[in-house]
Image: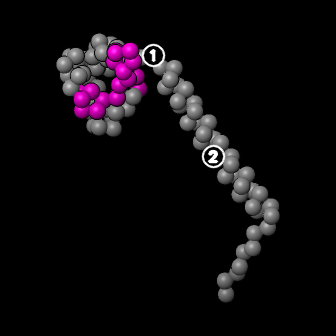
Amino acid sequence: MTQLFIPQEEDFRRWIRESVKAEVQETLATQKALLKIEDEPLLSRQDMSRELNISLVTLTDWMKKGMPYLRMNGRVYFRRSEVIGAMRHNGHKKSKS
């Protein structure tokens, strides 16, 4: 015969406390990651092409194929971590260490 478990008030309190704690920790981790990305310096097209050891023409082609970039005041900028992350996701390897 199967026993029936009837939760008590303290069980509900513990479950809610654990769920809220997990959500708060996840939210804090996400906010820390976003702050870290926002504090990262922006790289120009020239900086990024030097970083990747590619030409500006190749960089432009990669941008058309989905490389992440930011456009501000008519200029293009990159966050190194976003570019490297996209390259890893797409299976590309960085040319230069």
Disc number for residue 41: 1
Q: Which residues are magenta?
A: 62-81
Q: Quadrant of the N terminus?
A: bottom right
Q: Nearer the viewer, residue 71 or 80?
A: 71
In this rendering, does residue 74 appear at all?
yes
- Amino acid at dot 2: Glu
Identified at 59% across, 42% down, the residue is 26
Which residue was labeled with disc 2? Answer: 23
Q: Can residue 84 be seen from the camera position used here?
A: no
The residue at 75%/56% (across/down) is 14
Q: What residue occupies the far right of the structure in this picture?
A: 9
Residue 15 position, x and y percent, is 71, 57
Q: Does label 2 or label 1 sit earlier along the sequence? A: 2
Q: Residues within 10 Å of mark 1 (few under 14, many from 20)?
A: few
- The secondary element bearing badge 2 is classed as helix
Residue 83 at what x, y percent from top left?
A: 35, 27
Q: Is residue 9 left or right of residue 73?
A: right
The image quarter in which residue 90 lies: top left
Quadrant in which the C terminus is drawn: top left
Disc tally is 2
Q: Is the residue 95 above or below the residue 17 in the image?
A: above
